[in-house]
Image (cartoon, helix red, strand yellow):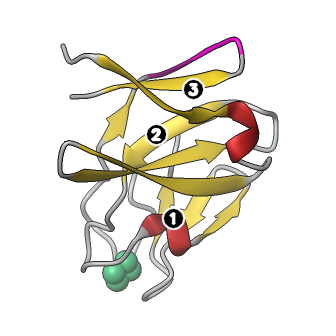
């Protein structure tokens, strides 16, 4: 299993929003759900090259900004055309006001 890396502060992400996090040459997306839980996925859509942090969070769904593909950001599950490949997800923990993700 990978190392835990500090990604951001809790308050860097608004409720029901997503931010980009770059580390080690990879891009991740960190989410804050409507019920105030944190999640992390790959930052790039599995369909084409689009940054999910530019997308829209609706409940547990991230909608890609490019062709409106949708994923469940809690599980990475692709929710239908045009996306058919699931997103990779990463464990997240919150300590104090910091958000950490475990790299795969
Ligand atoms: Fe994300 Fe096409 S690039 S849906």
- Tell me residue 32's x, y (percent): 68, 42
Q: Of residues 15 and 20, which is closer to you in this image?
A: 20
Q: How many other residues sit within 10 Å of disc 3, few (<14), some (14-19) or many (≥20)?
A: many
User: Mark 3 or 1 closer to N-term?
Assistant: 1
Q: Of residues 103 and 76, which is closer to you in this image?
A: 103
Image-quadrant location for residue 12: top right
Figure quadrant of the C terminus: top left
SS at badge 3: strand
Reading the image, the residue beneath label 1 is: 53
Reading the image, the residue beneath label 3 is: 99
Q: Of residues 3 and 66, which is closer to you in this image?
A: 3
SS at badge 1: helix
Q: Residue at x 59, y 46 (%)?
A: 31
Reading the image, the residue beneath label 2 is: 40
Q: In the rendered structure, which segment of residues is drawn in magenta? A: 92-96
Q: How many other residues sit within 10 Å of disc 2, few (<14), some (14-19) or many (≥20)?
A: many
Label 2 to label 3: alpha-carbon separation: 10 Å
């Amino acid at each position: 299993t990978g190392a835990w890396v500090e990604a951001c502060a809790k308050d860097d992400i608004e409720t029901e929003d997503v931010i980009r996090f770059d580390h080690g040459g990879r891009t991740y997306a960190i989410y804050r759900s409507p019920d105030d839980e944190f999640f992390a996925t790959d930052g790039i859509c599995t369909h084409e090259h689009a940054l999910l942090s530019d997308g829209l969070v609706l409940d547990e769904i991230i909608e890609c900004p490019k062709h409106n593909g949708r994923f469940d950001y809690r599980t990475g599950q692709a929710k239908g055309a045009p996306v058919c490949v699931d997103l990779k997800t990463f464990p997240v923990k919150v300590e104090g006001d910091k958000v950490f993700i475990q790299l795969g």
